[in-house]
Amino acid sequence: MPEYLQIALGLFGLAGVFVLTRYIVAYRIKRATGYIIRDLQKHRALDPVSAVELPYARHNPLRIGMRNYHAKAIEFMLSEGVVGKTTTEKYYLRLDGRGSLSNDEQVHD
């Protein structure tokens, strides 16, 4: 096999692995957001008064083992307005004006 073809195949393989890992990370964050929404619904944390602490919301840089995507998912959900955060580091599920989650945010058990 010519050398230029080996280099091209290597670059395509490297790009493919990069894209695949990005999809896997996005999938894991999506799963974590569903878990967080179900957890907040289970604890009935629907407003700042009923907000609860989430132990997995804190990022621990010294954590050893499998990567935990919950902290990144909460950060994303805060920026999108799905979850609210109190000044005491507690979290609650933000509802729309009708008193329920919008269609794309509903999670069923």
Image (spheres, grey):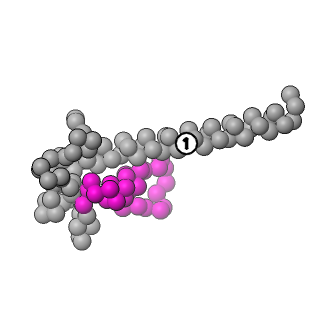
Residue depicted at 24% across the width and 60% down the height: 84
Residue 75 location in percent, x, y? 37, 58
Q: Residue furthest top?
A: 1
| Mark 1 burial class by Cα count in 10 Å: few <14, some 14-19, many 20+ | few
Q: Residue furthest bottom?
A: 87
Where is residue 14 shown, x and y percent of the image?
67, 41
- Position of the N terminus, as image quadrant, is top right
Question: Which one is in front, 92 or 58?
Answer: 92
Q: Quadrant of residue 83?
A: bottom left
Furthest residue to the front?
Answer: 97
Three-letter residue code for mark 1: Thr
In the rendered structure, which segment of residues is drawn in magenta?
56-84
Q: Nearer the viewer, residue 83 or 52?
A: 83
For the question of whether residue 74 can be seen, the reply is no
Residue 60 falls inside the magenta stretch: yes
| Residue at left offset 25%, top offset 47% | 37
Q: Is residue 25 left or right of residue 40?
A: right
Left or right? Give the position of 73 relative to 108.
right
Up-down: is 24 above or below 74?
above
Q: Quadrant of residue 109?
A: top left
Task: Give the residue number, with chain letter if any, for mark 1.
Answer: 21
Q: In the figure, 28 relative to 9: above or below?
A: below
Q: Is residue 27 magenta?
A: no
Q: Residue visible at 77% across and 37% down? A: 8
Residue 99 makes an appearance in the image = yes
Q: Who is closer to the viewer here, 68 or 102?
A: 102
Q: Is 67 placed left or right of 46 in the picture?
A: right
Disc 1 is placed on an element classified as: helix
Instruction: State which quadrant residue 17 falls in.
Output: top right
Image location (x, y in percent) of residue 20: 56, 38
Instruction: Give the tally of numbered discs.
Output: 1
